[in-house]
Amino acid sequence: MKKYQPFIINLSDEILKITEEQGLIPITPFARDLLCDMLTEKFIKGEISSTDTIDGIFEENEFMEFLHKVIIRDQLDLLKEMELINSYDEDGDEMYFLTNKGKDYLENLLET
């Protein structure tokens, strides 16, 4: 489990609460870790401080990239739950592949 500064956790919780209330993304451990990592990077670069609020922390393109990553991960997790794909770790990167069930499903889709 990763450790973050308390103000980073508070900022991420506030942002995630708003995104969930607006129906943009669900609050997941992946979303929280990704957002905390992004905020920590901004703090290290001196782009934010421990007294900042969420207003103006992210440029639109940065926040859209965050949303896209969370949505993609959410869909990959759903496909894993359906056993259509699986994954393995390769040098710290999660690599995805079709399972036999996924291959059969794809073949049936292509036939119709």
Image (spheres, grey):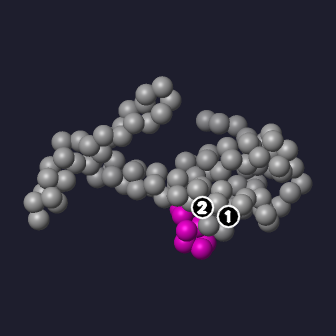
Is any atom of residue 28 visible in this view? no
State yes or no: residue 51 in magenta. no
Q: Which mark is residue 60?
A: 1
Q: Position of residue 48 (x, y in %)?
A: 83, 51
Q: Nearer the viewer, residue 14 or 34?
A: 34
Identity of the residue drawn at 70% across and 37% down: 3
Task: Check the picture and name the quadrant holding the N terminus.
Answer: top right
- Identity, as a three-letter code, of the amino acid under mark 1: Glu
User: Which element is circle 1 on?
Assistant: helix
Kindly indicate whether the residue at mark 2 contacts the one at mark 1 (C-beta within 8 angstroms).
Answer: yes
* Residue carrying label 2: 64
What residue span does the magenta drawing correspond to? 20-28
Is any atom of residue 89 visible in this view? yes
Q: In the image, is residue 55 above or below residue 66?
A: below
Q: Position of residue 4 (x, y in %)?
A: 73, 41
Identity of the residue drawn at 68% across and 47% down: 38
Q: Nearer the viewer, residue 10 or 99?
A: 99
- Identity, as a three-letter code, of the amino acid under mark 2: Met
Identity of the residue drawn at 30% across and 40% down: 97
Quadrant of residue 55 in the image?
A: bottom right
Single out the residue that lies furthest toward the left. Answer: 111
Q: In the image, is residue 13 above or below residue 1?
A: below
On screen, residue 52 versus residue 93, left or right, reads: right
Q: Which mark is residue 111?
A: none
Task: Check the picture and name the quadrant holding the C terminus.
Answer: bottom left
Count of marks overlaid on the render: 2
Main SS of residues in magenta: loop
CA gap, disc 1 to disc 2? 6 Å
State yes or no: residue 26 in magenta. yes
Q: Position of residue 57 (x, y in %)?
A: 77, 59
